[in-house]
Amino acid sequence: MPLKDLNEQQKEAVTFGKSPLLIVAGAGTGKTTVITERIAWLTEQNLAKTDEILALTFTDKTAGEMEERVDRMMPYGYTDLWIMTFHAFCERILKNHGLDIGIPNDFKLLNQTEQWLLVRQNLEKFNLDYYRPLGNPTKFIHALVKHFSRCKDEEIWPADYLEYAEKLKINQDSMEATGGSIGQYEEIANAYHTYQQLLLDSESLDFGDLINYALKLFRTRPHILKKYRTQFKYILVDEFQDTNFSQYELIKLLTGDDKNLTVVGDDDQSIYKFRGASVSNILQFKNDFPESKEIYLTKNYRSTQNILDLAYNFIQLNNPERLEVKLAETQKHLNTKTLSKKLTSQTDQIGIIEHLHFTTETEEVTGVVNKILELYNQNDKNHQSLSWNDFAILIRANNQAEPFLNGLRQAEIPFNFVASRGLYQKEIILDIFAYLKLLDNYHESLALWRILNLPMVKIKHENLLEISRYANRKAYSLFEAVKEIGILQKIEPETIRKVNKILSLLESHATLAKEKTVKTVVLKFLEDFGYNQYLLQKNDVFSFSLINQLGQKIDDFQKSFDDKSVKNFINLIELELEAGEEGSLSKEMEEGPEAVKIMTIHAAKGLEFKYVFIVNMVDKRFPSINRGEPIEIPDELVKEIIPSGDIHLQEERRLFYVAITRAKYGLYLTSAEDYGGTRKKKLSRFLYETGFTENTKNIKAQKAQDSLKHKNIKALKQDDKNIKKPVTNNQSPITFSYSSLKSFDTCPYQYYLAYVAKVPVPGKATFSYGKTMHATLQKFFSLIKESKNSLQSELFTENIKTQKVQQTFPSIDVLLKFYQESWIDDWYESKTQKEDYKKQGEKSLKKLYEQLTQEGAPKIFALEKSFNFKLNNYTIKGVIDRIDQKQSGLILLDYKTGSAKTEKTAEKDQLLIYQMATEKTFSEPVIKLSFYYLNDNSQISFLGTPEELLKMQEKILMLIKKICADDFIATPEKNKCQYCDFRNICQYRV
């Protein structure tokens, strides 16, 4: 977006020079636009390169969106963007420098469920008494893990906790002050120490460790801190109000003497106290950086003015613990102008604000559904057709969703329950789990019943009932009954044929499960049962994305466990379910097809909808009851500055404020008297605080547009409305890689299956071997690159070179050790094939090492160098394996593990794209392109001419044009089809 298109507030924030800056960005004021425009402006003004700007945020989705926006703004290429989450940033730092503080660079990062499993599997090591689990260890373990996480938010180390417990023992007055609970604190301190030691012993870290070990690294290794302070000339922090104590400490530590720190936030939208967010950080920023400037973004591009006024008037009930008031006090003392956070709508339209009150929860659900139908069949404020995506039902907690899910389901309205969890409850995943259970135990009757009911199997329901009756009559398992299906008189021949086929597949897959990985078995099930074809016929891209998410889970399992059997995987899933885990969902999966969105208010943060329904507005549901932490951190250890007043109520008000400001044109607050309990529910206090009362049906205001409607309505019959069919919206990609372009060039339908539908395919031995070799060489050459004594081989005579190599080269044993560590043990067809590849790899690496000792260490410019460059409005991305530097320019190398080719047969497109990227990104010229064939250590080298590069550019744009036109018509050829990953499910193969 050009600067001229920004408003004055945004422009001032984007073009701000040096020194600290606090941008107070209200809801819908273009916060993300300001951050991304500022990054682009800093680079355009040559104030910083892209890798000299650090932008930190809280979710991978937000980081991805920011990177995509910046990518569009960059006129040329760039090499490295540091736009990432706090955790991703710290993980990257520790992967590079962990050894400097005694933690392994290749640590495993544990999620919350894996932390729970770690404690569960080592429970006997915790020596618990006060917290000894009685009957339900699951809930207790969750409380412990959550407590450890909160300690890390406050940068409380086990040693700090142990020291605190020891002081309590010494001080008798403290014992009395704590009510004699010293043993409790001592037990927690020891448990925390044990937990941290278990992490270290297993070479694992949790998410809190990422921040705290990064802090430890920077504090104890000043030269490393100096390196990153020097690199990052500007630091930007998004959603600053959501930072916890440790994260803010990290920001302050990284900020150099220039203090070019920009933080963007809104204290009124601080809603993550439950995960350690400290609203005090944004309130304290002015104290930490008194020279900082504040810029308020108050022009709202989302909501109507009456919706904004409702939100603003309500949130002032949190005064004086709000930034607006705090800064006003400071500015009053300094006799400077006081700024207001009151948002101004940029539309003249009048929004709908209604409170709909019902007798029962069922009526509330039906009323919400009917109101959605009523609105859907009308045009919106701009006389455009509404989409199901324009509606959101916001709930305070996930357990309030089910009645509304059922209501939308009965009305046949497409919906998506957006949750960060729930993978394990999706239909396709339940089918896969059922089949894996069946392979482990044929007599799992419920699992077999699910498989017999698969939609692509198409067994008649009456036949299934007859089989079930027979099993019950004979006291058989369902498997035993289907084994005797031939003697059942009422079963149709077609059903017998289908059942026998399933039994045959079950037997062959059970054998496969004893020899192959879980992932191989899952993919074989999907292929042999026709599940992939079924999903393709339905164009169900969403289910393929779910399968891929489960595939990642299986990959993680296979990396982490020695016992990689189906049985052990099923045991792991059952343990996770016991721990309350429902399977994490990626943001892409949460989005899914067009649908009404049902989500918690926390999940809705950052989103907007034309019409928003905030439901269950009754006492004890919203605001919720303050349950506190299961295990509280002692006040003496808390480092966060705690605001005064009712902290829980203040947070609930902020949550309601966020909910209100999601709405563009319509806001509906709904409630009911009867939710199934013995007492009628009272209205939420928030309804009173926003001007609604139980006894008034219509509240009049001075202006018509400010009127708030309070209705007690009866639900319409569901058949009174016609439901429109949802419209799918396939967005064309803007980013491409050589691999994706090559796939489309080979066959457009192959591209569709791989990059649009994302149909999962089995791996290949060649891929596992190739990744192993690439990882080995990356580690080895990184060691060489980091060596301070590594010099260009041209500077030495032959004898000196050999001597120098012996002094500075890592030994062959180091290279082979990297090879063993990097070995990927998957997708080999047999042990013999695996051993053959392993021997080939060792042989190739020894040859490579011998060649290096003779020729000397290359001067390495970069390894695994990622690139992005612009071609018209598109971005081409990729990674160059290795770039060597000579006096006259750069050599680009790409490793190949396949058979060596001649210059005529080599596929030059890949390196020509790399040459284009390098020439657009770096100032040094490219002097040579090389395919490096590792099997025989041979090279095919060339350099693209200007004519070849122009022709390559034209080819890329031609392919992109066809992709964006959804031109996915298959182009089958025998020599292509026989090597295609999708040949078994493609109806066009030859």
Image (cartoon, rainbow, N blue to C red):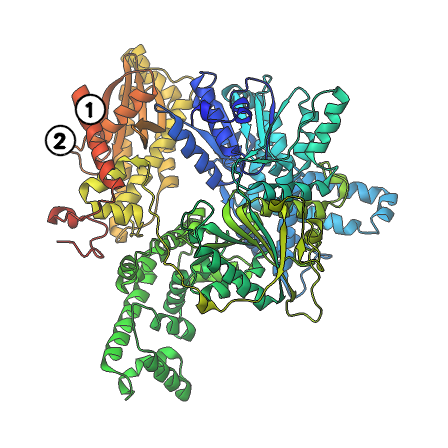
* Depicted 797 relative to depicted 900: above or below: above
Q: Amino acid at mark 1?
A: Leu
The residue under the point 30% across, 75% down is 459
In this rendering, does residue 828 appear at all? Answer: yes
Q: Taking 788 as reference, is 151 above or below it?
A: below
| Type of amino acid at the residue the image marks with label 2 | Thr
> Quarter of the image holding residue 319?
top right
Coordinates of residue 181 in the picture (x, y in percent): 80, 51
**Res 211 quadrant in image:** top right
Q: Which mark is residue 902?
A: 2
Q: Residue at x 80, y 40 (%)?
A: 167
Q: Quadrant of the N terminus?
A: top left
Figure quadrant of residue 423: bottom left
Q: What's the mark number on residue 289?
A: none
User: Along the polypeptide, which appears first: circle 2 or circle 1?
Assistant: 2
Q: Does 347 sit left or right of 343 as displayed?
A: left
Q: Position of residue 133 (x, y in %)?
A: 67, 61
Front residue of 594/740: it is 594
Residue at screen point 61% across, 22% down: 20
